[in-house]
Image: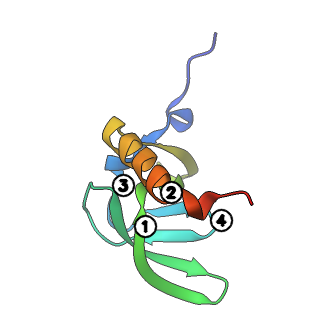
Amino acid sequence: MTKKTNEEKPMKSTELKKGDKVLLTCGFIAQIMDNKNGNIRLANIYTDHGEEMGRVCVWDINAFVGEENGDFCFKTIELTPAQENAREISIKTFSFFYSKS
C-alpha cells in the first residue's frame, strides 16, 4: 500500500480562502471572493459569456485549482459532516430539480 503524497490528499472546504480558484461541478472555473467557512461562498464565476459574481454552495465545488510550492496543484474538495448533511437536506428539499422524467 502506498502512502498518499501531499498533492493527492483532498483539501477541506474550510481551507478555501479569498482568491483561491476552484473548479465547479458545472465545469466552470470560479475565484472565491470571501473568507467565510459556511455552506454558501461568494465567487466570481468565469463562464463562456464572461464573468458573473454569485453565491456557490460548497458541495458544488469539485476541486481546488492553483499553485503550491511553484507547482500546478489540483486537489479534490472534502466536505465537513455538517456540510454533507446540509447537502442531503438540500437534495431532498429540491429533488424536483433532479428528477429524471
Measure the C-alpha gap from mark 3 to mark 2.
Answer: 10 Å
Q: Within 10 Å of the Cα at label 2, are there few (<14), some (14-19), or many (20+) other Cα atoms?
A: many
On the image, numbered disc 3 is attached to which residue? 16
On the image, numbered disc 4 is attached to which residue? 27
Q: Within 10 Å of the Cα at label 4, are there few (<14), some (14-19), or many (20+) other Cα atoms?
A: few
Locate residue 16 relative to residue 3 in the image: left or right. left
Q: Nearer the viewer, mark 3 or mark 4?
A: 4
Q: Residue at x 41, y 78 (%)?
A: 54
Vertical comparison of 63 with 55: above or below: above
Q: Which mark is residue 61?
A: 2
From the image, which quarter does the C terminus lie in? bottom right
Amino acid under label 3? Leu
Residue 1 visible from this viewpoint: yes
Tell me if label 4 and label 1 are in contact, CB under 8 Å. Answer: no
Q: Within 10 Å of the Cα at label 1, are there few (<14), some (14-19), or many (20+) other Cα atoms?
A: some
Tell me if label 2 and label 1 are in contact, CB under 8 Å. Answer: yes
Q: Which mark is residue 56?
A: 1
**As rendered, which of 79 and 35 lies closer to the eye?**
79
Measure the C-alpha gap from mark 1 to mark 3.
Answer: 13 Å
**As rendered, which of 57 and 36 lies closer to the eye?**
57
Amino acid under label 2? Ile
Q: Residue at x 56, y 24 (%)?
A: 4
